[in-house]
Image (cartoon, helix red, strand yellow):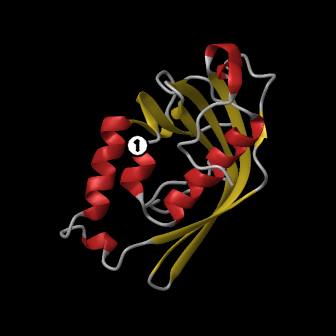
Amino acid sequence: MSTLTDQPEAMGVISDQQLIDFVYAESKLLDSLQFEDWLDLFAEDGYYWMPLTHDQTDPRLQTSLLYEDKLLLRVRIERLAGHRTFSQQPKSRCHHLLQRPEVHSDDAWHQPTQGQYVVGAAFHYVETRLDQQTLYAGWSTFQLKDEGGQLRIKQKRVDLLNRDAALRSIQLFM
């Protein structure tokens, strides 16, 4: 299996398999609670977005469950690591079960010659702490860009199946 630091193939275009491997490795970092390494996958102008409505197109003009830039993601990671974060004593754990990711070559943002890629995967996500376990299902869509031979997340969009339900507090990242 490829690693996150693999170099692009000849001609500067990253293979579909490298894109798929990136998505699997990203979820593995989350499952192993390696949040700093996970955050390093984001471009400086990257976003983590969880829309509130189906087919939502604008996170700025419409309400979202989450829309966080890299700074806000860092704040959440620091909170999770804090010794005074009593909601994380003991710490939450998570597990992603992904359907095989697909490269979305029909997406307008997907332009391999420009170093831009779109990859999506359906998932089941379990978050657990103490005797409480919560299951979420949905789809993740990654806008990835090649920054000097390294894939970076421009945007990770998480569309929950039950996004319109009253949701419990989501502690970690899907």
In the current view of this chain or complex, which residue is farthest to the bottom? 131
- Is residue 98 shown left or right of residue 154? right
* Nearer to me, 168 or 69: 69
Quadrant where the C terminus sits is bottom right
- Is residue 57 shown left or right of residue 43? right
Residue 76 position within the rendered picture, expressed as x and y whole percent measured from the top left: 32, 51
Residue 45 against residue 157 in the figure, above or below: above
- Toward which corner of the image does residue 86 lie, by quadrant? bottom left
Element at label 1:
loop
Quadrant where the N terminus sits is bottom right
- Toward which corner of the image does residue 114 lie, by quadrant? top right
Residue 24 against residue 63 in the figure, above or below: below
Residue 103 against residue 107 in the figure, above or below: below
Visible in this render: residue 111?
no
Residue 60 position within the rendered picture, expressed as x and y whole percent measured from the top left: 46, 23
In the current view of this chain or complex, which residue is farthest to the front? 10
Residue drawn at (55%, 76%) of the image: 133
Residue drawn at (47%, 59%) of the image: 170
- Is residue 118 shown left or right of residue 94? right
Say what amino acid the circle numbered 1 marks.
Answer: Asp
Residue drawn at (51%, 33%) of the image: 152
Q: Which residue is mark 1?
A: 40
Residue 150 position within the rendered picture, expressed as x and y whole percent measured from the top left: 52, 33
Residue drawn at (56%, 51%) of the image: 26
Residue 139 against residue 148 in the figure, above or below: below
